[in-house]
Structures are given as C-alpha cells and as structure tokens.
Image (cartoon, rainbow, N blue to C red):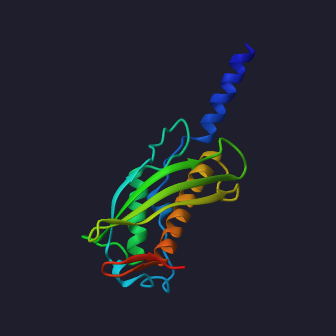
Amino acid sequence: MKSSKILILLFTAAWLAGCSSPAQMEGMVFTPDASAVGSYDDVLQKQMQVKSVEGGEDTNPIWTSEISNEAFQAALEQSLANAGLLGTDGRFKLSVTLTQVDQPLFGFDMTVTSKIRYALKDTLSDKIILDEVIVAPFTATVSDAFAGIKRVRIANEGSARKNIELLPQKLEELNIGNEQVSMAF
C-alpha cells in the first residue's frame, strides 16, 4: 500500500512537471554585435561550411531534454551566417562533435556544460587548421523557468549558444594566408 502511494505521487509529480522537450535551434543561435561581423580574416568571410555534426542525442520526452545533431547544426549555421562566415561552397569545412553534455538530474539552478570539438579543414591545403574542444557552462535558474524540465532545456540551449559564441573567438586567432595557416599569439 505504501509503495503504491509513492508510485502515485511520483507519477503525479512527473505529470505536473510536464514532458521534456528538445533544445530548440532558436535558443542556441548566437548573434554577434555589429562590430564583430566582418572582423575575421578576409579568407574566412563567407567561406565556411558545416560538413557534419555528430554526438547529439534525440530527446526522450519522459526523461530529459537533449541537443540533437540537426538542431545544433541549424543553430551553428545560422550563427556562422550571422557572423558573415557561412558560405554555400566554402573553402573551409567544419566538422563538429558534441563530445559531452553534462546535465543535472534535479535542482533549483540547472547548470549544463557542453564540450564540443570543432575541426576546421582547409580544402585547398587539405590540412586541419583548427582542432579545438570548447567547454561552455550555462546556468538556468528558477527565475528563468519554474519547471525543472524547462530549466534543463534552457540550460542546454544556453550552453550550446555559449559554446558557439566561443568558436568565432578561436577563429579570430587564426592567421590564414593563401597557403599558410598559423595561430596568432
């Protein structure tokens, strides 16, 4: 009898909390301020393409929010377009792997940390010119959303957005010539 009451209580709590929803592309898009657009090496302008995104997961509605490959790729492409870097037939191909997304199971403040590997290949030289793992935490609080499931989704989106935001900073460090690439120090 006692276990059935606990079970009913758990189902009621889950019902009241709602179902998980996946991270939305719109919540992951980074828009740089106007001064940053066009500040990258001229060779990069409208010359990047997202070749692939791997490692994301589809959301199970009865478990927790996740970041899918498709949503992350759409957000990354929109962010690169916002920065003036995305091109239709770009010289530089970006391969992305969501290596780890750490999420809390419960709590008031939900901090999600994304670890994403970006590998940028120059198709002219056939060399990898950037191979970085970017780590980006983001915390969603009760003021962002009362329901824990929604806070996790907001934290997922915020962490992915922050991660995407840090990529152009790495790109600004590149010195790309017609045949030569180096990191600025």
Residue at the spot 24% in from the left edge and 70% down from the top edge: 89
Q: Residue furthest top?
A: 1
Residue at the spot 48% in from the left edge and 84% down from the top edge: 34
Q: Quadrant of residue 40?
A: bottom left
| Relative image position of residue 182 (x, y in whole percent) | 44, 76
Mark count: 0
Q: Quadrant of residue 88?
A: bottom left
In the displayed structure, does residue 47 sit left or right of residue 108? left
Q: Residue furthest bottom?
A: 35
Q: Quadrant of the C terminus?
A: bottom right
| Relative image position of residue 47 (x, y in whole percent) | 31, 74
Q: Residue furthest right?
A: 2
| Relative image position of residue 99 (x, y in whole percent) | 50, 50
In the displayed structure, does residue 147 sit left or right of residue 77? right
Of residues 76 and 107, the one nearer the viewer is 76
Q: Quadrant of the N terminus?
A: top right
Q: Is residue 102 above or below residue 165?
A: above
Of residues 115 and 111, the one nearer the viewer is 115
Residue at the spot 50% in from the left edge and 86% down from the top edge: 35
Q: Quadrant of residue 25?
A: bottom left
| Relative image position of residue 125 (x, y in whole percent) | 29, 70
